[in-house]
Amino acid sequence: MANVLMIIAPEKFRDEELFYTKEELENIGHNVVIASRKASKITGMLGGTAEAKISTSDVKTKDYEAVVFVGGSGAAEYFSDKIVQKIAREMNNDKKIVAAICIAPTILANAGVLKGRKATCFQSEHENLEDNSVKYTGRNLEVDGNIITANGPESARIFGKKIAELLKKIITRNPDS
């Protein structure tokens, strides 16, 4: 199965967006690795905890078939983070799956990954997407090629299922992945 990198904020990630998405991916056998600014135990907005096994500065994108940027108020710390923007651009350039939920699509927009593409996000960030030449749709979930975006915690399960669906198509085309 695929290796999936999930990037969470160093604090205040949105619990459902991490845990439900991760569960959907692991239920069908994908290996999920959590990363953050530093490898450590992190508490979400609702009190759940997760262990970031790797720091974003140590990520090697060649090791993953997909990257998922998790939202929550803490994700704003990554809006201008050059390291996570580089991860997003490298994964996109390699035609791997790039996914973001809630306010995290702003990371992709600021990295230039969403320019000219359809995307959605949490309502508070739609103007930033539009300011970055993104075709904001306002839908719960949006897929544009290898890019998957979702609007928030209520979409976390369908977001995880859609990532898994796209990974299956990639693995079917490239069985050695």
Image (spheres, grey):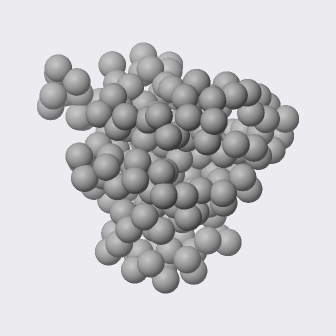
The answer to whether 137 is drawn above or below residue 173 in the figure is: below
Quadrant position of residue 176:
top left
Q: Is residue 55 left or right of residue 16?
A: left
On the question of residue 160 being in view, the answer is no
Q: Residue at x 72, y 52 (%)?
A: 74
> What is the residue that sits farthest to the front in this orientation?
57
Percent x, y of residue 108? 45, 61
The answer to whether 51 is drawn above or below residue 85 in the figure is: above
Percent x, y of residue 34? 56, 30
> What is the residue that sits farthest to the right in this orientation?
47
Percent x, y of residue 63? 33, 28
Quadrant position of residue 21:
top right
Q: Residue at x 66, y 60 (%)?
A: 76
Percent x, y of residue 145? 27, 55
Choose between 132 and 54: the one closer to the eye. Answer: 54
Q: Residue at x 44, y 35 (%)?
A: 59
On the question of residue 37 being in view, the answer is yes
Quadrant position of residue 52:
top right
Q: Is residue 68 left or right of residue 72?
A: left
Q: Residue at x 74, y 33 (%)?
A: 42
